[in-house]
Amino acid sequence: MSSRGAVGFVANPASGKDIRRITARASVFDNQEKTAMVRRCLIGLRAMSDAPIRYLADANRLVESALAELGFDGEAVDVETNGKALDTTNAAVAMRGAGAVVTLGGDGTNRAFAKGWLDAPLIPLSTGTNNAFPVMREATTAGAAAGLLVSRRIPLEAVAERAKVIHVDIEGEPPDLALIDAVLTQDRFVGARALDDPGKLVAAMLTRADPAGVGMTSVGGFAHPLAERDDATLTLTFDRASPRRVVAALAPGRFESIGLGQTRTATLGEPMRLTGPGVLAFDGERERVLAPGQAATFRTLRDGPWVVDVRKVLTRAVACGGR
Amino acid sequence: MAEAEQRELTYVDAIIEGARTILLEQDNAFIAGEDVGGAGGVFGSYRGLLEEFGPERVVDTPISEEGIVGLGVGAAATGLRPVIDIMFMDFMGECMDEIANQMAKMRYMFGGSAKLPVTVVTMSGGGRNLAAQHSQSLEAWLCHLPGLKVVAPSTPYDAKGLLIAASRDDNPVFTVMNKMSLANRGAVPEESYEVPIGKANVVREGEDLTIITYSRMVSESLTAAEALAQDGVEAEVIDLRSLQPMDTDTVIESVAKTHRAVVVHEAVRFGGLGGEIASQIQELAFDELDAPVSRVGAPFSPVPFSAVLEQTYLPNADKIVAESRSLIGA
Amino acid sequence: MSTPSDDVLLDIHRRMVRIRTFETEAGRMAEAGKIPGALHLYVGEEAVAAGVMVHLSNEDWITSTHRGHGHLIAKGGEFDRMFAELFGRATGYCRGKGGSMHISNMDLGMLGANGIVGAGPPIAVGAAFSTKYRKTDRVAVTFFGDGASNEGSFHEAANMAALYKLPVIFVCENNGYGEYTPQAKHQAIVDVADRASGYGMPGVVVDGMDAMAVYEAADAAIERARAGDGPTLLECKTYRFFDHVGVRGMGLTYRTDEELAEWQKRDPIHLFEARLAELGVLSKDDAVAIHEEVLAEVRAGIEFAEASPTPDPDTLLDDVYA
């Protein structure tokens, strides 16, 4: 079945459960709350629109349970699932053409989605840890915005901003991408994933550097702020022994002093080439291993998801008359 | 020691003094249970101990019997000497796995490499209109479990002495206290002493029959014995004190003298310890018996609430007298 | 968080290989009728035991489950006395009184495998109470499954550990099945770690097939416990490659061959060896040599057990009491 004209739902059961709950007392997002959020979102959607619903059937049945509770119809996209991030990427491919997609998760969830559908119209709701990309927002009205966006055929350009993306080419391997930051570390393992040890940082590229954010964006933000809307990217190199230091929020509940090498604002498209050994971390999570001598190139372009501004959609709808 | 010069304490104060002695003598000992600290125990049996020893050693717990007994098992296996309070014996249903499958068996299952010096204090018995779930006498459950020891003090003296003995024992020992005995007074030495586990006490000598009993039924049996004496029947009364291990020698010795035996307990008669004791007597002293061993126990019914029903239910001196008379054929 | 040295990596690897080899051979022995009773084998879940235990010393306590051999091996259990116990011999760790389901070694800080699902957590709370009472920085780790997380004992223990801020690490080995019942049919949640916040402790989910994911999370949880900050619930998503009991078990069709094959693609030992080879920490040849060395040790253990005397019937009543 085509996803055209549908509203997509992806809720990541794994977000908000990694070791930062221990190391930094990061916020806890249990799956009952995620299901409750989906339910509220669906109610908002149905209040404004009869658009068909397509969703990723995750192992925790987050969306399925919410639909069942409400007695709403929805169709799971036909993809194989194994409880990994790849499920989200495959679901994104299957959802191409949908009028809006609501994601519940963190930066990682949206990154996995963008890997399957780069220019998706996204309403990202935060349920993760170091979230720079999705925002904390009440799901009820986010659902209403998704419905209005689809039913009223509101042009995306009027209510959404195109996000920057860091494209990562890895020598001899499939490419990857990041929405906020791509980092090379001296780690040897992906392990428990969370980017944890500031002493191991080598270099990073950031689409935004926000001192009010958490994670690498905070590190960049305290060194050289850069907004998402700026048509530029920030590159950093790190040096443990450097006298030039920033104190930044590396994780929720955790400030660290980090030694900086070079900090530079680069133009979009300008490459940053790095070589292994090491581990590549994207949006706060260790993801890929880089062998000794293996090259990786980071490049930021503004060709990412359309991030929908819920308030703009609703305000515009009100201006044009209610349902 | 002249009894007259001795100080008297109530049964409940004797428990406090026993518990206090344990904490004073053994650095590795602590008390844990529901309301044992701030409240001093719902029966008052730990009053003042929190103030004296602090919250590390007098530990108020959540209402989580399985967790509390597990705490005792884990702490004992790793070198402490816990005193665990299970407020009402009826609550053993909440923690029977930790009692039966962990505490009782750990040493044996581990080939002798573990030691479980845990003391459990619990309160049994009816008579206070607390109905079916707060009045039971479930000691037979415990005595059926190899690995456990079980004692049941009848007097203030025994309450303190058996509690101290339990805490010094390297095995799990249940000290089954009785809630109707709490205000009873009796001589209790101030110093630390043990009442040895496994040793019965002949509390009244007689030649005509042996009453074998424990806990609160000891005093009922003594009252019965006085009534029987009016008729010229002299009953010997044995307070078992320790139910597991049981001092069978003292029982057999007495039966060999009196040739008649009645076993008395407050617990339900069917499947109670009386059956085990009667069986042992017939196995070990069949030729000495002039009559079948008889038993006094509660009827096969939950403990009722209403005072009239509860008093009808509970064994007492009158019932012991009646059973004894029929045994003697008087 | 500490960075593991090559020695630590090799240690983790060896612990996993020791478990795999012991369990595989024990399964073979059981199917050949040489080991009596019921064996619950740990094959597939090695990364959990190894990734946690490498952080512990003999003074740290653990409680285990009916699937307990792996925990004892990772805690330092010796093959000869373990096999002797499985064979019911007098030389076994429990002198033939415990067998597979109660195998233990107090000297190694291993408070026993346990035949009762969910019995371990309260005991671990007691062990942690001990270490805190003595003012040491030792911890207690309790292993249990997704099934055991439905037992009241788990909930009572979790509440008490958090209440008293005890150094307990609750390690849930979520292998997706409570005996033969899939998780979806025994609890309405998928992440057991979600239960943690209800008790006031952090809950974390890691990939239980990835030894380093377990290692890092266990490191953080144990560090937190040693610092006196209280318990953690660490859920490791894992899978047993053998049946609930034995190797092929009762031949029930409660799970599919495809599901098993899917998990076997992520064999924790293969994954770890591949990464160690990439890092130049352990070559393929060296890994093979370790497997062979461990297998020889396992065979020696079996020989020791088979040559050992059965218990003297006169010892029947020994150790009922101290």
Image (spheres, coloured by chain):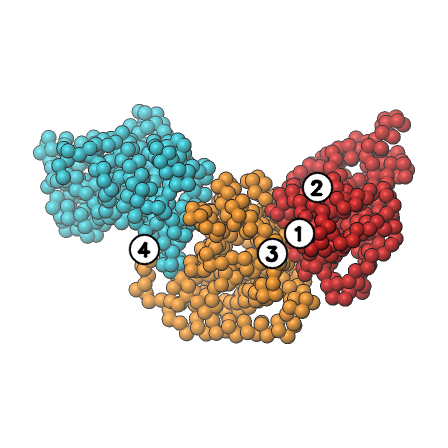
Kindly identify which residue carries mark 4: C322
What color is chain C drawn in? orange
A150 left or right, relative to B155: right
A247 left or right, relative to C115: right
The cyan-coloured chain is labelled B
Kindly identify which residue carries mark 1: A196
Q: Position of residue B287 (x, y in %)?
A: 14, 51
Q: Are marks 4 and 2 in contact (CB under 8 Å)?
A: no
Question: What residue is drawn where x is 74% and y is 33%?
Answer: A138
- The amino acid pointed to by label 3 is Ser
Q: Residues within 10 Å of mark 1 (few under 14, many from 20)?
A: many
Question: What residue is drawn where x is 32% and y is 55%?
Answer: C322
Image vertical order of residue C43 relative to residue C196, above or below: below
Q: Residues within 10 Å of mark 4 (few under 14, many from 20)?
A: some
Name the one closer to the observer, A16 or C137: C137
Image vertical order of residue B135 relative to residue C45, above or below: above
The red-coloured chain is labelled A
Kindly identify which residue carries mark 3: C2
Q: Residues within 10 Å of mark 3 (few under 14, many from 20)?
A: few
